[in-house]
Image (spheres, rainbow, N blue to C red):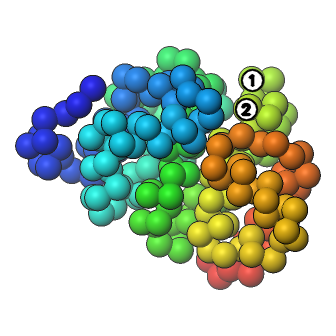
Amino acid sequence: MQLPEKELDEMSAEDLVLTCVNFPLFGYFTAFNTPQEGFNIMFTRFNIFKKICEKDSTGHYLIKIYKNAGLNGWKQRIYKLEEKYWTLKLSYLEFLISQNEVISRLDKHEKIELLLIAKTNFNQKIVHESFNSFAGISSTLLLIAKILNSEKALDDLELESKKSIQYFFETGLLNSPEIIDKILISTELYLNGSKF
């Protein structure tokens, strides 16, 4: 699952992103105690994930691909991207984008665009039979929360909510239904206060 370093260095940001999205072991993160532990290991074990964090404009292509990801598969076949095991693939994509190494390379405009896409996906997921569970919505909610956190839009939450969100960040697992509403309210406040 390692790519030759020379090829990695020569790959464009777009090709790196496409390779990550089509990563053959994309479900590997589920083999660990928590999704975040799985991603921590993937980012240290496989060189494609290290490289995606070094290239400029990978965020642009991740957003473009995420925008094309519907709840039932790719909306348009603009790339040769796999869609087998789609519910897992979509979660993988959202967990991938929500990694701090990826979020930290986005500018404010990209974060807002990503937040709007994730918000739409969340609203669709909660009424979709394949996603309307904690497991189904957690990757989308994590992406939303990570963007808000990077913009310091969760700083005003009370201590108990901050503890639950910190656990969420560390594990990728929702342990408190109350934080769903806190994150959604913070999303609206942030978007209403942002000029976009």
Is residue 3 found left or right of 178 in the rendered image? Answer: left
Q: Which mark is residue 130?
A: 1
| Residue at the (39%, 52%) spot, across then down | 61
The kind of residue on which mark 2 rests is Gly
Give the camera-side residue of 114 and 31.
31
Give x and y (percent) for residue 134: 80, 35
Q: Is residue 66 above or below residue 78?
A: below
| Residue at the (65%, 43%) spot, across then down | 171
Q: Quadrant of residue 159?
A: bottom right
Asked if the residue at tag 2 contacts the one at tag 1, i.e. Cβ–Cβ closer than 8 Å, the answer is yes
The kind of residue on which mark 1 rests is Ser
Which residue corresponds to mark 2?
A: 136
Give the camera-side residue of 158 and 106.
158
Is residue 153 found left or right of 45 in the rendered image? Answer: right
Q: Quadrant of residue 113?
A: bottom right
Mark 1 to mark 2 CA distance (whole Å): 7 Å
Give x and y (percent) for residue 150: 59, 69
